[in-house]
Image (tube, rainbow, N blue to C red):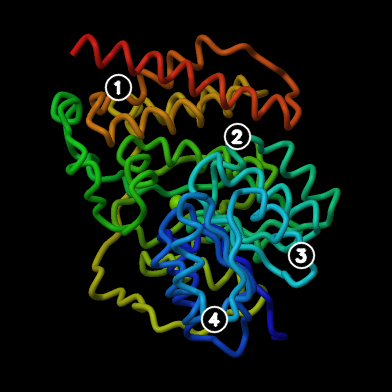
Amino acid sequence: MEKRRIAILGSTGSIGRQTLDVIREHRDLFEVELLTCNSSFMTLAAQAREFDANNVVICDETRYKALNDALKDSDTKVFTGIKSVCDLVASDRVDIVVASMVGFSGLAPTISAIKAGKVIALANKETLVAAGSIVMEMSRKYGAPILPVDSEHSAIFQCLLAAQGNKVSKIHLTASGGPFRTWDKEKIASATKDMALKHPNWSMGAKITIDSATMMNKGFEVIEARWLFDTPVEKINVVVHPESVIHSMVEFEDGAVIAQMASPDMREPIQFAIGFPERLPLSNQKLDFAELGSLSFFKPDLDRFPALGLAFKAMERGGNIPCVLNAANESAVAAFLRDEIPFYGISDVVGECMEKAQFIAEPTVEDIFATNSRARSDADRLIESIKQKS
Ligand code: MG
């Protein structure tokens, strides 16, 4: 494979760091053109030095000076602000963009990269939840392929390579079930932040770990799959699979099911996206089937995990409602992480914001940004009233 010049948006986060782990094993195949993060300037400076990055951006302007000082005697150019991310990502010197920022903040730079016709390795699922139809339409218009990094979607993508043009009858999206899979409703209701942050299989950032505990993450992934694979939601089946060995499955009209398996380690789907169509050798844990013994499967419980039901509802209503779902969830998860609302407060806030929202059937990009701000202030007001009651 020819050397690829890579930009990593959110390089100090979990996916960003693991992308650099993959690159560390294949230094001859990648040149690090751009690294960006929100505020972790020490980590960003260390990454820039190790990978000899040409440019770095720190979004938090108050950290610019500290980052600049840390990189004073290096060749790396230092920038600040989200506008710089949007500009640099579109540069001729970038071939592939790993979009691994957290939440809605990933939308603007991803749109900028798509408009510049870059290959997008998409880890930021909120981009497709909030603006799926717009982003996919742009991807086609500007010839910017979107390759999934999310493990389930990478699995589906890998299974679809076996389709050979045949019709897919179903996508089976697997879910670990999160840390509260076996808990009853009362116990979940009183779950603390520390309990929710202990994911059984995956080590991830705080926001997505809470989303896994509520199963909102799986709801987002249904929406993400709907857009990435142009598949109606009715054909997407969520199945709880606690071992996280099968990362998803595709069923064909003859009943044959193709599954993709690997140890739960994000470096596998990351390498598949940034190396595609080649598979890069990795020093990850390989599967030992005799050691595994058995794999198990269960139906998801929408009563104990109402967030998953809300995501289905948002998708059914369509328009700007999935954007409301995402925005309200971001505010509510942040409030839960500040110990301001109880665990089920997250789905309560999201559900109420969806009820309240002004429906727009075919939102523009501007509508999406406006919907996002409005839903966040609605959510913040609800959070404030929950806080005062408790
Ligand atoms: Mg996933």
Indicate which disc residue 74 carries. Answer: 4
Quarter where residue 336 is shown: top left
Indicate which disc residue 130 carries. Answer: 2
Eye-nearest disc, 1 or 4: 4
Q: Total label count?
A: 4
Mark 3 touches mark 2? (CB < 8 Å): no
Q: CA distance from mark 1 to mark 4?
A: 47 Å
The three-letter code of the residue at mark 3 reads Ser
Mark 2 touches mark 4? (CB < 8 Å): no
Specify few, some or many for label 1: CA neighbours under 10 Å numbering under 14, 14-19, or 20 or more.
Answer: some
- Image quarter (top left, top right, bottom left or bottom right) of the C terminus: top left
Nearest to N terminus: mark 1 or mark 2: 2
Q: CA distance from mark 4 to mark 3?
A: 21 Å
Name the residue: 34% across, 18% down.
383
Nearest to N terminus: mark 2 or mark 4: 4
Mark 1 touches mark 4? (CB < 8 Å): no
Image side of residue 187 versus residue 227, left or right:
left
The three-letter code of the residue at mark 1 reads Gly
Task: Give the SS element for disc 2.
Answer: helix
- Disc 3, ligand 1: is the CB inside 8 Å? no
The three-letter code of the residue at mark 2 reads Ala
Percent of width and height locating residue 183: 17, 35
The residue wearing badge 1 is 345
**Could you tell me if residue 257 is visible in this image?**
no
Percent of width and height locating residue 64: 51, 58
Nearest to N terminus: mark 4 or mark 3: 4
Indicate which disc residue 91 carries. Answer: 3
